[in-house]
Amino acid sequence: MSRVKNHPDFWENVEKTDTCWLWTGSQNYDGYGNFYGKRTHRLAYELTYGRIPKGFYICHTCDRPRCVKPEHLFLGSPSDNSIDAEKKGRRVHIVINSEAKKRYKKPRIKALIDANVRHQRKHLTNN
Ligand SMILES: [Zn+2]
C-alpha cells in the first residue's frame, strides 16, 4: 500500500478537464481505473483525505467511474439505492452500511459523516 501511496506517477495519468479529472491509465472491465491493482477513485480519495474506513465505498457525484477528482468523491454504500436519487436531487447524503455500523462506535461514525457532509456541501455549492 505505501508503495502505491507514494507513487509519483499516479496523478500523471490523469486528464484534468473543466469538470472531471479522468484517469487515462488502464481500466478494469467495469470502467473503473486500475493502478497497481487498486481502483483509482479509491486511491485518489485515500491520497487526498486519508484511509477509507472498512465497510465504506467511494462514490462519484459526477457518475463517471474514470473520474478521480477528489471533490467528486464521497463515502457511501452501493447497496443503498437512494444514493443515486439523492445525488440527482443535489442534496447532501451519506450512507453507512451495516458492516461499518458494527465496526465503529457511534461518535466515530458521526465524525466521518460530518466530514463528508461538509465535503459534499462544499462540492455542491461550488457547482
Ligand atoms: Zn468527476
Image (cartoon, helix red, strand yellow):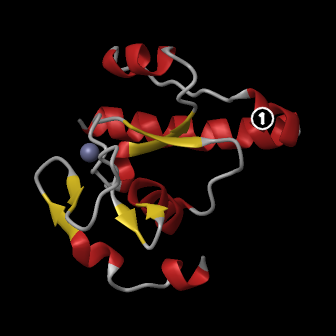
Which residue is nearer to you in this view: 102 or 91?
102
Q: Quadrant of the C terminus?
A: top left
Q: Find residue 22 and report its image quarter.
A: bottom left
| Residue, far left | 18
**In the image, residue 3 above or below residue 20:** below
Which residue is nearer to you in this view: 99 or 21?
99
| Whether residue 118 can be seen here | yes
**In the image, residue 12 above or below residue 14:** below
**In the image, residue 21 above or below residue 93:** below
Q: How many marks?
A: 1
| Whether residue 104 can be seen here | no
- Left or right: 64 with respect to 60? left
Instruction: Identify the residue at image location x=24%, y=68%.
Output: 25
Residue 70: give x, y in percent of width and height.
38, 55
Which residue is nearer to you in this view: 126 or 28?
28
Instruction: Identify the residue at image location x=49%, y=84%.
Output: 6
**Residue behind mark 1:** 99
Residue 19: give x, y in percent of width and height.
16, 47
Indicate the amino acid at tag 1: Glu
Are there few (<14), some (14-19), or many (20+) residues within 10 Å of tag 1?
few
Instruction: Identify the residue at image location x=37%, y=62%.
Output: 34
Residue 14: give x, y in percent of width and height.
22, 67
Quarter containing ligand 1?
Answer: top left
- Left or right: 67 with respect to 87? left
- Left or right: 117 with respect to 98? left
Q: Which secondary structure, mark 1?
A: helix
Residue 120: give x, y in percent of width and height.
44, 37
Instruction: Identify the residue at image location x=60%, y=44%.
Output: 115
Q: Quadrant of the N terminus?
A: bottom right
